[in-house]
């Protein structure tokens, strides 16, 4: 099966086995359309769900107490790709961006995408690592990104603009 990561379990919530989840989707409301989530390749039926502010609280079948819920802390929630929402033009699943090569217009490979962070601002932040192992970050802006080809795992950028906004880790 082909999975997409949709969230991360932050902690147990209460004593009945509910978990607090940080969604990796545009809206936690999307979880309401799901019936099954996968954790470590094991399916869990959703028994209850509520969305509050920027978190989702989920009761999973078989997770019946705080200890069982706490054992899932830090685990990623996945869905089968066939259950994913349809994306609009210019939208991408984070899971599809990770592993893409960041390539400038002359074909030079700048690095490989390792993470995409969503802080709720105007642009997601791409984290990539170059061949020397140095991490760099830049905003996912339309004027900076000239093309994204998920099939070819290529994330094309305009080098001059990348140099203006890129931040390197020391």
Image (cartoon, rainbow, N blue to C red):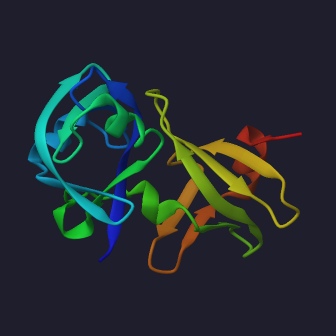
Q: Quadrant of residue 23?
A: top left
Answer left or right for 46 relative to 134: left
Whether residue 73 appears in this view of the structure is yes
- What residue is drawn where x is 72% and y is 76%? 107
Residue 96, image x and y in percent? 44, 65
Residue 103, image x and y in percent? 68, 68
Residue 137, image x and y in percent? 69, 44
Q: Quadrant of residue 133?
A: bottom right
Report how many numbered discs are placed on residues in the image: 0
Q: Quadrant location of the N terminus? A: bottom left
- What residue is drawn where x is 24% and y is 42%? 63
Q: Nearer the viewer, residue 21 or 130?
A: 21
Whether residue 91 appears in this view of the structure is no
- What residue is drawn where x is 36% and y is 33%? 67
Q: Nearer the viewer, residue 10 or 123?
A: 10
* Picture layout, residue 22 above or below residue 97: above
Q: Nearer the viewer, residue 109 or 62?
A: 62
Q: Quadrant location of the C terminus? A: top right
* Picture layout, residue 100 above or below residue 63: below
- What residue is drawn where x is 32% and y is 74%? 2
Q: Quadrant of residue 71?
A: top left
Residue 14, image x and y in percent? 27, 20
* Picture layout, residue 140 above or below residue 111: above
Answer left or right for 93 relative to 146: left
Q: Nearer the viewer, residue 18 or 64?
A: 64
């Amino acid at each position: 099966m082909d999975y997409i990561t949709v969230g991360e379990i932050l902690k147990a919530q209460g004593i009945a086995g509910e978990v607090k989840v940080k969604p990796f989707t545009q809206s936690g409301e999307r979880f309401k359309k799901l019936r099954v989530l996968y954790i470590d390749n094991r399916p869990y039926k959703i028994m209850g769900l509520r969305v509050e502010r920027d978190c989702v609280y989920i009761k999973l079948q078989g997770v019946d107490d705080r200890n069982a819920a706490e054992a899932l802390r830090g685990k990623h929630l996945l869905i089968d790709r066939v259950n994913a929402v349809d994306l609009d033009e210019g939208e991408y699943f984070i899971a599809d961006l990770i592993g893409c090569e960041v390539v400038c217009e002359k074909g030079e490979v700048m690095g490989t995408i390792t993470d995409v962070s969503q802080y709720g601002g105007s642009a997601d932040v791409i984290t990539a690592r170059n061949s020397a192992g140095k991490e760099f970050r830049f905003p996912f802006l339309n004027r900076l990104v000239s093309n994204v080809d998920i099939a070819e795992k290529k994330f094309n950028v305009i080098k001059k603009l990348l140099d203006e906004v890129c931040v390197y880790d020391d």
